[in-house]
């Protein structure tokens, strides 16, 4: 009986470590508390007892409200991505925002 319990606890611990390792390799986009486009590492869920399964990795200077609605819906869908894919998407958003926010010569 004791051996069975020890084996079960070891298996559960192994599964927990594997789940944590897997979750720490995925990223998703969301918004920060300040409303900015934000890159998070982990899973876009909250566990019981207010445990977050994600951590802030990078907060963009681009407000989510500045992104066109259809694009905003697509990027804020909490799709799991690699860090490279997620960071590339954030850079593209920042590049587009910089182009549209830049004043044009001869206009006020």
Image: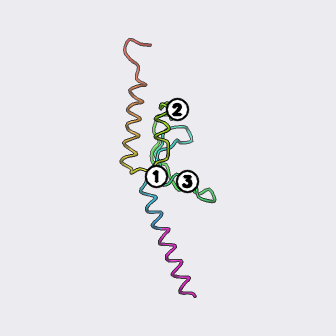
Question: Which mark is drawn over residue 65?
Answer: 2
- Circle 1 crowding by C-alpha within 10 Å: few under 14, some 14–19, many from 20: many
Query: Quick check: marks 3 and 2 in contact, CB under 8 Å?
Result: no
Which contiguous range is marked in magenta?
A: 1-16
Q: Is 59 positioned to the left or the right of 83 in the image? A: right
Alpha carbon of mark 1 to alpha carbon of mark 3: how far?
11 Å
Which residue corresponds to mark 1? 41
Callout 2: helix, strand or loop? helix
Callout 3: helix, strand or loop? strand
Whether residue 2 is in magenta: the answer is yes
Please tell me whether the stretch drawn in magenta is mainly helix, strand or loop. helix
Query: Quick check: marks 1 and 2 in contact, CB under 8 Å?
Result: no
Q: Give the vertical position of 45 relative to 3 (above or below).
A: above
Q: Residue 17 in the image: x percent, y percent? A: 47, 68
Q: Quadrant of the C terminus?
A: top left
Residue displayed at 53% across by 82% down: 6
Q: Quadrant of the N terminus?
A: bottom right
State the residue in front, 4 or 17: 4
Mark 3 or mark 2, earlier in chain:
3
Which residue corresponds to mark 3? 45
Q: Is 68 positioned to the left or the right of 89 in the image? A: right
- Circle 3 crowding by C-alpha within 10 Å: few under 14, some 14–19, many from 20: few
Callout 1: helix, strand or loop? strand
- Circle 2 crowding by C-alpha within 10 Å: few under 14, some 14–19, many from 20: few
Alpha carbon of mark 1 to alpha carbon of mark 2: how far?
22 Å
Residue displayed at 41% across by 40% down: 90
The label nearer to you, 1 versus 3, is: 3
Mark 1 or mark 2, earlier in chain:
1
């Amino acid at each position: 009986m004791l051996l069975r319990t020890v084996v079960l606890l070891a298996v559960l611990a192994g599964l927990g470590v594997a789940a944590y390792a897997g979750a720490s390799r995925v990223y998703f986009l969301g918004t920060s508390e300040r409303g900015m486009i934000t890159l998070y590492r982990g899973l876009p869920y909250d566990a019981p007892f207010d445990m977050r399964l994600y951590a802030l990795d990078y907060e963009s200077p681009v407000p989510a409200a500045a992104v066109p609605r259809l694009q905003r819906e697509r990027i804020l869908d909490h799709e799991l991505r690699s860090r490279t894919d997620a960071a590339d998407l954030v850079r593209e958003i920042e590049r587009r925002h910089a182009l549209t926010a830049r004043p044009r010569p001869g206009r006020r």
